[in-house]
Amino acid sequence: MSNSKDKNNSPAASADNSLIEQRRQYEAGTLYRDSLAASPVKQFEDWLRDARDAKLIDATSVALTTVDADHKPHTRMVLLKQFSDDGFIWFTDRSSDKGLQIESNPAVCMLFFWRELERQVRIEGHARKVDDSLSDEYFYSRPEGSRFSAAASDQSRIVTNRKVLEDKVSELHGQFSDGSIPRPDRWGGYVLEPDYFEFWQGRNDRLHDRFTYRLRAGTQSTAEPTQWTIDRLSP
Ligand SMILES: Cc1cc2nc3c(=O)[nH]c(=O)nc-3n(C[C@H](O)[C@H](O)[C@H](O)COP(=O)(O)O)c2cc1C
């Protein structure tokens, strides 16, 4: 096994591990001011439709960043389940680390990356809990296995081994043998209410296209396109 410190005392200098040559051109598309929708939600809708039409796997998966009480950021994937002018919704265990982080700091960021289309979308804003009725509607639409797993899992907490989880699922099946397990109080949705979007389209020679939408200060309605200021950013 080669010693990664042999050359220049730098891990990157090891031929086996070098990532320096890992690059490609981005040439799948372009993004111009004239082609942008006036509303960022409409622009997102158009791009998500492109991703779904292209049959991208997990096109609705998104990296979600939250910040804890010590200002330390944490990122993980979730699945976007709904979006509208009111915001971007996902579901989770609200007692999880991300839930506790949102409790202490509602500022959150979502990042979509559609690799095959060479596009990323950044959405920033504040998260709040959705109404119980919406959490119920989504929870009871989930497959039975997912509902039992959600109830058995105290998300983000340490568990001794997998068997503990499987035993808990079995116990709940015994308790709710007809499958009618109720939504745990700690399980539900959040909505990210956006104040900032960035649409990024990869271009040749790294001269990428980037456009931001910023919600004007004091704006009441994110649904009104004129409330958003659009700018092109240097790549
Ligand atoms: C593609 C993908 C989708 C996921 N979707 C969700 C989701 O919608 N909700 C959720 O709670 N966890 C989801 N997870 C698991 C989370 O990434 C994470 O492990 C979990 O929510 C615990 O995060 P936390 O400990 O930071 O709170 C998903 C993971 C992947 C890889």
Image: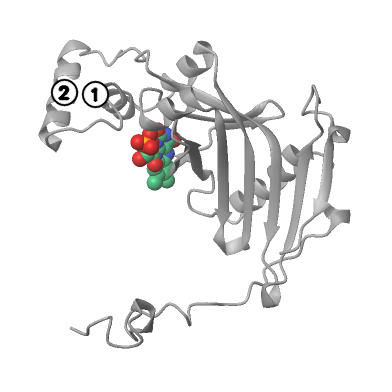
Any part of residue 36 in sight: no
Which mark, residue 168? 2
The answer to whether mark 2 and mark 1 are in CB contact below 8 A is yes
Callout 1 environment at 10 Å: few (<14), some (14 to 19), or many (20+)? some
Q: How many marks?
A: 2
Left or right: 176 in relation to 85: left
Left or right: 93 in relation to 133: left
Residue 159: horizontal and vertical position, in percent?
17, 32
59 or 131: nearer the viewer = 131
Question: Can you tell which quarter of the image residue 15 is in?
Answer: bottom left
**Measured Cα–Cα span from mark 2 to mark 1:** 6 Å
Any part of residue 67 in sight: yes
Three-letter amino acid code at disc 1? Ala
Left or right: 161 in relation to 3: left
Q: Report the quarter where the N terminus lies.
A: bottom left
Residue at 37% across, 84% down: 13
Callout 2 environment at 10 Å: few (<14), some (14 to 19), or many (20+)? some
Residue at 67% across, 66% down: 202
Q: Is 170 drawn above or below residue 41 in the view shown?
A: above
